[in-house]
Amino acid sequence: MRRVLLILFAAAVWLPLYSGETSSDAIIRVLNTRVAGSVSEFDKAVEKIAVDAKAGKPLQQFLMVILSREKDPPQAARLSDDVCEKYVKESRGKIYSMAREKNNSLAWYLIALENNNRRILRHAANLGNVQALNAYATMRLSEGVEIAESNPEAAAVAFAESFEDFTKAAGMGDANALNSLAICHQKGYGCEKSETAAFKYFAKAAELRHPEAVNNMGRFYREGVVVKKNLASALKCFEISSSMGNSWGAVNYASQLILGEGCKKDSKKAVALLESFAREGKSEVMDFLSSCYERGLGDIKSDSYLSLVWKLRAKAARGDENAAKWLKSNKAEL
């Protein structure tokens, strides 16, 4: 436990530093942080890509167009129609040429993202692109979960395939795959259930500064699963995960601050932290704030109006138009 926590402390200091990062490194960081549960790190990576795209780099331009088409793109990826058209014109031919003529796995992966094409995604995965391996495995895992009750045999096949791909990606030293393998062991997806194995893979992912894995390790320490219960260690894991931009890490860290678990109570610090994440549009954090005011958690006084406001803010963040209208009419938007 001591070794893992020391590694995590070092990670918390090192994570924001990207001196000497190449353009290619930044692309990989965008693709990795996109699914690692760290909004702030993803946004920083996109800002780097945006600069390179403006400089005329085709991979970055192509990726920026893909990101701009997401439901709620980061600020740096909110491109005008003219800029999108320019980037597509300048980059698409080059990316397709990289894929077809050089069989570049990253180019194939980006094409798969642009077209939401399962066959091309599998091709990029077969070529050894670790992001494609993770994406395909995640898709198969989700499919297995969806059909687990209605078609357990087909679900078992999907789980086995996803577990195999996660294992391949983890063998390439990928933190996202290690975190996913931990979840597979926790749930029994494609393998026997094992909290011990889950903790081992969460710890490996945490050593590679994976924010979700660090948060999950905190849960082991908080609940005393596999390791001895240690609220102070749990608090440190949640604090580090939160500092990496993970919203569930923030919720768990704030919860312990409010209740005084492993630390002195500090509701003021907790609420300030939660509100900073809420401003990034994280609905789960808004839900937790609503619950805090509804129940009067810790030193937070019960406040039915604030509870309602945060509940509606969470709904609006998830796309509820009626909630957004109420907030606007009552001047209660974030």
Image (tube, grey):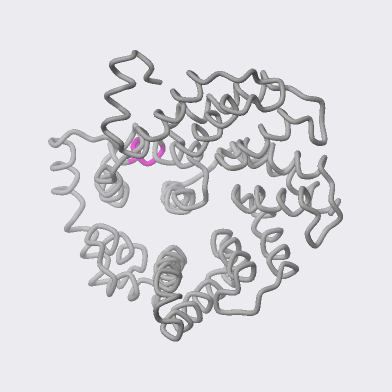
Classify residue 201 by image quadrant.
bottom right
Q: Which residue sits at x=86%, y=55%?
A: 228
Does residue 234 appear to the left or right of 331 in the view shown? right
Front residue (pair 313, 86)? 313
Residue 93 spot, x, y in % from top left: 17, 58
What secondary structure is the magenta-colored segment mainly? Answer: helix
Front residue (pair 23, 292)? 292
Q: Is residue 146 visible in the rendered structure shown here?
A: yes
Front residue (pair 329, 41)? 329
Q: Which residue sits at x=36%, y=63%?
A: 106
Residue 43 spot, x, y in % from top left: 43, 37
Does residue 219 appear to the left or right of 307 in the view shown? right
- In this view, which residue lies farthest toward the top? 331
Q: Which residue sits at x=84%, y=51%?
A: 229
Q: Is residue 19 visible in the rendered structure shown here?
A: no
Q: Is residue 213 above or below residue 258?
A: below
Does residue 266 appear to the left or right of 320 in the view shown? right
Front residue (pair 31, 323)? 323
Residue 220 spot, x, y in % from top left: 74, 54
Q: Is residue 26 on the magenta stretch?
A: no
Extent of the magenta region: 48-52
Q: Is residue 197 above or below residue 17?
A: below
Q: Is residue 319 above or below residue 290?
A: below
Quarter of the picture containing the N terminus is: bottom right
Quarter of the picture containing the C terminus is: top left
